[in-house]
Image (spheres, rainbow, N blue to C red):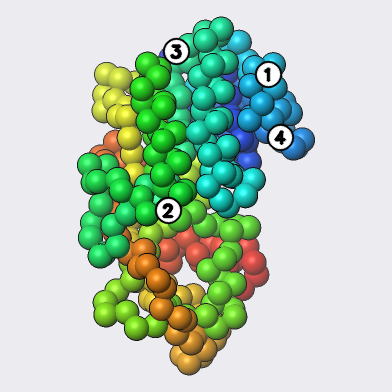
Amino acid sequence: MTTSFITPPLKTVTLLGCGDIGQRLAARLPDDTEVVGIRRSPCEHPRIDYRQADLNDPDSLHASLPQDSDVIVITLTPSEFSDQGYQQAYVDTVKNLLAALESRTPPRLILFVSSTSVYGQTDGQWIDENSATEPRGYAGKRLLEAEQLLTDSGYTTCVVRFSGIYGPGRQRLIQQVREGKGAPAGDDGALYSNRIHVDDCAGVLAHLMRLMQQPQTTGLQRLYLASDCEPSDLGDVKQWLAQQMGFGPDHLQPGPQAPSRASKRCRNQRLLDSGYQFQYPTYQQGYRQVLETMGIA
């Protein structure tokens, strides 16, 4: 997959909430593109001009936001996992951004990183960009609210709904396997899970920015569901991980039945049709890379 951008070139890309995904994205952008990262805590990266700001403070964001940004990428992490935390991280930040943009050159694109938590399906059915969004929890509701603010803003926007992100430093499932925690007990069928490697998260965002620059071909759509090519039963994933980590077949013990099954299968066909090629199309390929970085595989 080529990483070259066609003209007109991207002069400035601004990353709001620039953490792990933003840093990986910056490394994929052309060398002559200025990358501005705005976040609360200071950081250093060879490709990013960091500007410290509180995205929940309109004046702070206004002072740090470049006058001209070709693309603004919103990749946020709530300060706390609560309704208020998600309200501040997503809804309030988007409102503050839209207010700040009133006195600036309109960006060519606003890319918003959302989540498949906006879907409430629990029966293992396939979902895609056209599926109903009826989130069951505050996270999905607040993300959907932020999505709608951007959609109604009048700017050119694109929402990317990532499924469960994993990769180096994101090892929750590996830790559960190490502790012998298996899939929930008492399921009458597969408990489907969906995931995407963090390197593919950055790859997808870079790919969509390229599409924005070549409307004469596939063109950029307003919404993409980004998940790898193999939705899988959570029990199968954990058993595979246990085997790769050298544990015996009886290491994993069934966990308590979850009060609400989060079981669905994410279809990534729109993303594949746009020309994106996954670096890690299956969990086996992706987790093998993670285990290698941990010195396990």
Q: Position of residue 253 (x, y in %)?
A: 48, 87
Q: Position of residue 35 (x, y in %)?
A: 62, 25
Number of the front mark, 2 or 3 = 2
Label 1 SS: helix
The residue that mark 1 highlights is: 59
- CA gap between label 1 and label 2 equals 31 Å
Number of the front mark, 1 or 3 = 1
Q: Amino acid at mark 4?
A: Arg
Crowd class of label 4 (few under 14; some 14 to 19; many from 20; radius 10 Å): some
Residue drawn at (56%, 51%), measured in percent from left and top?
82
The residue that mark 2 highlights is: 137
In the image, 65: left or right of 108?
right
Q: Amino acid at mark 2?
A: Gly
The residue that mark 3 highlights is: 8
In the image, 200: left or right of 62?
left
Taking depth in this image into account, of 262 and 240 the one nearest to the observer is 262
The residue that mark 4 highlights is: 40
Q: In this rendering, is residue 6 above or below 190? A: above
Quarter holding the N terminus is top left
Crowd class of label 1 (few under 14; some 14 to 19; many from 20; radius 10 Å): few
Number of the front mark, 3 or 4 = 4
- CA gap between label 4 and label 1 equals 13 Å
Residue drawn at (36%, 26%), measured in percent from left and top?
151
Taking depth in this image into account, of 198 and 253 the one nearest to the observer is 253
| First in sequence: mark 4 vs mark 1 | 4
- CA gap between label 3 and label 4 equals 31 Å
Residue drawn at (26%, 77%), measured in percent from left and top?
189
